[in-house]
Image: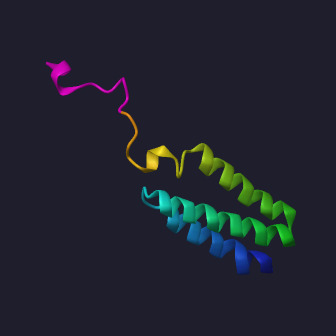
Amino acid sequence: MQAWLIGGIPALVFALIAFVGRSPWRSLLGYLFLAAGFVILAQADRASAALFAIIIALSLAAGRGGSMETGSSEPSPWASSPSADN
């Protein structure tokens, strides 16, 4: 319980704050906070550290910090152009 109060909850809060927005640097900072929380809780309780591992895996699977964060992704081929609607 004490590990959650000292490291777990602050790491989650700071990571969530860092993930707001679409900056790749903020996403990297969010992953660093999650990794720090994982390390802190892994020393105290492995089951709690697994929660951080799941959050990291789901964030990576959702594409946080990837090419979608830069805004330089290619447009969807299914997106309609304004001239095609006429």
Left or right of residue 33, residue 42 in this image: right
In this rendering, is residue 23 above or below 17?
above
Magenta highlight on residue 77:
yes
Residue 27 position, x and y percent, is 53, 59
Left or right, 13 with reference to 84: right
In the orientation shown, which residue stands out farthest toward the left?
86
Picture residue at 64% right of the left edge, 48% below the top: 58
Choose top left, top right, bottom left or bottom right for residue 1.
bottom right
Residue 20 image position (x, y, % from top left): 46, 61
Q: Indicate the colouring scheme.
A: rainbow
Is residue 34 rendered magenta in the image? Answer: no
- What secondary structure is the stretch in magenta mostly built from? loop
- How many numbered marks appear? 0
Q: Which residues lie in the magenta part?
A: 75-86
Residue appearing at x 51%, y 68% in the figure: 17
Q: Is residue 9 left or right of residue 48?
A: left
Question: What residue appears at the point 85 percent right and 71 percent down from the top-left corner?
Answer: 43
Closer to the camera in the image, 67 or 2: 67
- The answer to which quarter of the image holds residue 29 is bottom right
Give the x, y percent position of residue 34.
Answer: 66, 64
Q: Residue at x 61, y 61 (%)?
A: 31
Residue 25, image x and y in percent?
49, 62
Left or right of residue 58: residue 77: left
Quadrant including the C terminus: top left
